[in-house]
Image (cartoon, rainbow, N blue to C red):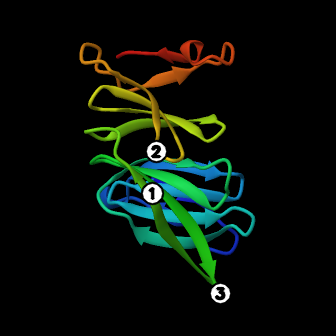
Amino acid sequence: MLNFLFKREKNLEFESESQILKSMCIVNNKYLLVGKLDGNLLIYEIENKCLIYEGKISYSINCLMGYEEDSTKFFVCLETSGIFLFELNRINNEFEINLILKYDFHQLCVKRLKSLGNYTFASCSADSSFVMWDIEGRIFYKLKDQSHGLENFVIKKKDSTISNLITVNDK
């Protein structure tokens, strides 16, 4: 059982299978995002220590990542496929999320997503593909490696060239 204790909220407990946490991330030290196996997304405001949003995205949330250039935007990768860019908006005193873009670079679920800075990102998938792309969805590097079952990678910045930027770890 995993507990979150907030000053203004009750102790939140996740016990049942539908409440299993799948992914968590902190967005610019402002929000804690929690993705659950049942597809629900919880967003906590860190400063006020309170839940500000709870809603169903769809399917299981596989990974989450904040968008470093804007504290109101974040990426969600689902267990199916696709990477989604959402924006958190406050209207009066209520919070809502809006879909901004969907990226379809992979055929199966995205296992890992990483910001490379300067509005560029890298992702890898259960379909053994690795893609480097920008916020507009333009692909500038793609690798499809059937032999190693590529599902994870490590970014190492040796210098500013792309060829020296990526080290791939296979299973």
Q: Is residue 141 above or below residue 164?
A: below
Task: Name which of mark 1 and mark 2 comes first in the sequence.
Answer: 1
Q: Which mark is residue 137?
A: 2
Q: Amino acid at mark 1?
A: Leu
Tell me the CA gap for discs 1 and 2: 9 Å
**Residue 25 placed where, x, y %?**
57, 48
For image coordinates 50% across by 51% down, the residue present is: 75
Tell me the CA gap for discs 3 and 1: 24 Å
For image coordinates 57% across by 67% down, the residue present is: 88
Mark 3 or mark 1, whichever is nearer to me: 1
Mark 2 or mark 3, whichever is nearer to me: 2
Kindly identify which residue carries mark 1.
101
Kindly identify which residue carries mark 3.
92
**Residue 122 placed where, x, y %?**
49, 33
Would residue 10 be seen by someone viewing this image from the given angle?
Answer: no
Q: Is residue 112 left or right of residue 29?
A: left
Task: Name which of mark 2 and mark 3 comes first in the sequence.
Answer: 3
Q: Quadrant of residue 115?
A: top right
Q: Amino acid at mark 3?
A: Asn
Q: Amino acid at mark 2?
A: Gly
Query: Depth check: 118 or 146 in front?
Result: 118
Q: Is residue 6 above or below residue 138?
A: below
